[in-house]
Amino acid sequence: MQQQTDDMEVPLLNDSNSNRQKSLAPERDGFSHQQKDSEGSMESPNLEFEYGDTDSFTAELSELYSYTEEPEFSLNRDYFEEDFKNHVKGRRWMELSMEEQRAYVMRLLDALEVTDRDKRLKVARAILYLAQGVFDECDTETDVLYWSRHNVFLLYDMGIFTALLELLSMEIDNNQACSSAVRKPAISLADSTELRVLLSIMYLMVETIRVEMEGDSPERKAAREAFKTELGSPLYNGEPFALLLFTMVTKFCSMNAPHFPMKKVLLLLWKTILFTLGGFEELQEMKVRMRELLNLPPLPEDSIKVVRNMRAASPPASAMELIEQQQQQKRGRRSRRPLVKQDSLDTYNERDPFKNDDARDEEDDPEDVDSGIEGEVDPLDRDVIIQPPPPPPPLRPPTERVSFPKGLPWAPKVREKDIEHFLETSRNKFIGFTLGNDIDTLVGLPRPIHESVKTLKQHKYVSIAEVQIKREEELQQCPMTMGEEEVEETPAEILYLGMLPSLSQYVIALLKLLLAAAPTSKAKTDSINILADVLPEEMPITVLQSMKLGIDVNRHKEIIVKAISALLLLLLKHFKLNHIYQFEYVAQHLVFANCIPLILKFFNQNIMSYISAKNSICALDFPHCVVHEMPELTAESLEAGDSNQFCWRNLFSCINLLRILNKITKWKHSRTMMLVVFKSAPILKRALKVKQAMMQLYVLKLLKIQTKYLGRQWRKSNMKTMSAIYQKVRHRLNDDWAYGNDIDARPWDFQAEECALRECIEKFNTRRYDKNQNTEFTPVDNCLQSVLGQRVDLPEDFHYSYEMWLEREVFSQPIQWEGLLQAQ
């Protein structure tokens, strides 16, 4: 951990020093072009970003292909047309009847079984062209998507997916290709052609069938459910399809198969997990149903709806809203000077507690989000301290307030453990003794304590995890009384059972890929090469080609980060709902594999630049590139990028990584201390610059859990951040997060906490999954005649060598009778 800490400290110190030097520089009217690019998004209004399971359907399809794969679209078409014209002369695919289309697909399916590798590849390319929507016969992108959907359901109905799976297994086990790739000094697209074609078809099938459309027929809905069940069941060599893809990931990361197209594998793995287990809205529905089954009260609110209704800038003004309003006023000029003391700003801002909220929105000057990091304060702040306050502007129209809920967005929660702790403290104070876990007896306590307990019980929240932990303790303590546990064979349960033997390898492999794809990672000689499926055979020779490849490489890395972050978050959420100890097992492996410093390293960059990155070329995106004529690309057009305000996938990745960090640190004091040790507070505060409510919420959650460890001075100089936490994060009624008086803030035996958790996880895994070890309660046969009379299955040829066996194993072995007596 010390080594990781040192690695994290170096960039922070460098940032601090460089920014301190900037603050001492004389005032200037403008900044360099690079600074304007990196901070341009800060001046924009709210990011109109809607978080969901995935991006738009066309965006998800386009991200499957690298820009270097563009010539292969025409190659797929040529192989299809060559074969199609030989069998269906003078007609187009769209003109065939359904029966004729089925007959042709059946012929392609038979051709997939030929032994000639090149012929198989040509047939696979023809099938890929069908899955891509026979784009040469289409005039618009809508037509391409329509025929792609039509053909994909046809391909699934004809059993193409099962045939592709057999071919994929053959390619994975192709030792000749693996050994050839290992010996090559440089791997390119050509080394993974067969795998890329197979994975592309499978991805198009999974993604197209996964997405429901309004006009889907009952047959398509039935096919969708059948495919979902098929992917989630252990039908492929006794394990779910996702396990095969996990095996590809680990094989790639162990350097045994460096030619595997990892981006396509990760995208297919993510969409398979999303399809079989369900997305975030389905998770919410499953959670509601499970609480009903466990006779727990309903959830106080729908968290998805609450987060969607939150705004980064909504009255009453919070710290982040004020920050973004301030940034919008910085369009003209920016200047730097030494940091103004924060509490003087707070004193000014709070001078009139009765001032109108709307006026305060315009007048209050926020703290600088990077106070202590960037060391800069806008000259407007200086004016605020010196000049008298300007007159309040007119009130905003009431229509702007309609969509905002009154009060705090979240209902407060209290755990039963918190009520017990409160009563224990109160009884010690007023009576002098405690009653253990009794939360009902209030004899001898004063009236205000009665009222407090009543309020706490009104907001008491019992989670599904607490019920599962209690049930597991009962099963461990009373195995004979409780009997065998009935485990429902859910898709999550099947997946966990398959992942269990090699779970640590899967987690480490995913984190290795995440590290390699992170923009803050530096290229090392021993790091894995994730660019095998993006680099062309011939490297670029012109500036334009180099720019295009540079954009392609950056886009490639961003898509890998997106897929891994979404995949890990889905696994954590589904395993937590299925059983808390399944979640804890994955989370602990993530922690032991240094996931916490890795995510913090990811955020230790100019996060505004990352979110507003323009690493895409719209003209080359599928299906646009196969329908429209290719415009002439220039260095200027590539540098300008698209007109989008932000990059959806990068903002999606950032939110996912923050959610993962929240998941693995929540209620874990040892892991919270890791956040403190790695100096995460300034890194997280920089992420608050992103004007998106959901991202701000998860950053504030991470800051909240560590405020008690950061000291009074930090809290005093970051009061606006504390205020934002109060406004946006759920309250725990007796959680002294803002004061550091909680018992949990005392020195903690962190290693013991992780070891105790590990012990509980191992007991759970052994009890539920390791049936061979459960011999402690198996009845023992003590009757000698019964034991000797049992029939033992012996090999057929045993009687031929029976006498030799007796001589070797019995008669020739001296028996140490004294040793037997001593052992007794």
Image (cartoon, grey):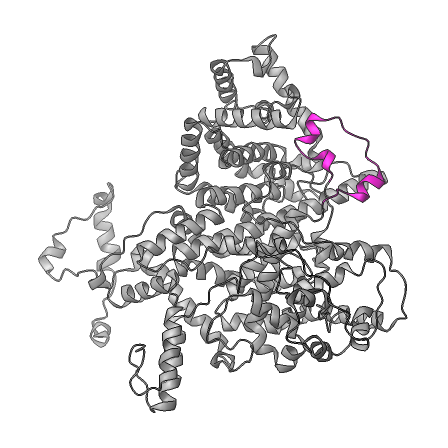
Q: Is residue 582 magenta?
A: no
Task: Return the x and y of residue 750 as percentages of the image width and height.
Answer: 50, 75
Q: Nearer the viewer, residue 294 or 401?
A: 401
Res. 264 image quadrant: top right
Res. 533 image quadrant: top right
Image-based side of 269 in relation to 37, left or right: left
Task: Return the x and y of residue 556 as percentages of the image width and height.
Answer: 67, 44
Which residue occupies 51% across, 46% down? 247
Quadrant of the snapshot with the N terminus:
bottom right
Q: Nearer the viewer, residue 331 or 810?
A: 331
State the residue lying farthest toward the top: 90
Image-based side of 535 in relation to 19, left or right: left
Q: Nearer the viewer, residue 798 or 450?
A: 450
Q: Is residue 317 above or below residue 227?
A: below
Please state the extent of the stretch shown in magenta in the rendering.
Answer: 617-644
Res. 240 image quadrant: top left
Examine the rendering and report whether any part of residue 528 can be seen. Answer: no
Image-based side of 593 in relation to 229, left or right: right
Examine the rendering and report whether any part of residue 617 can be seen. Answer: yes
Which residue occupies 85% across, 61% down? 333
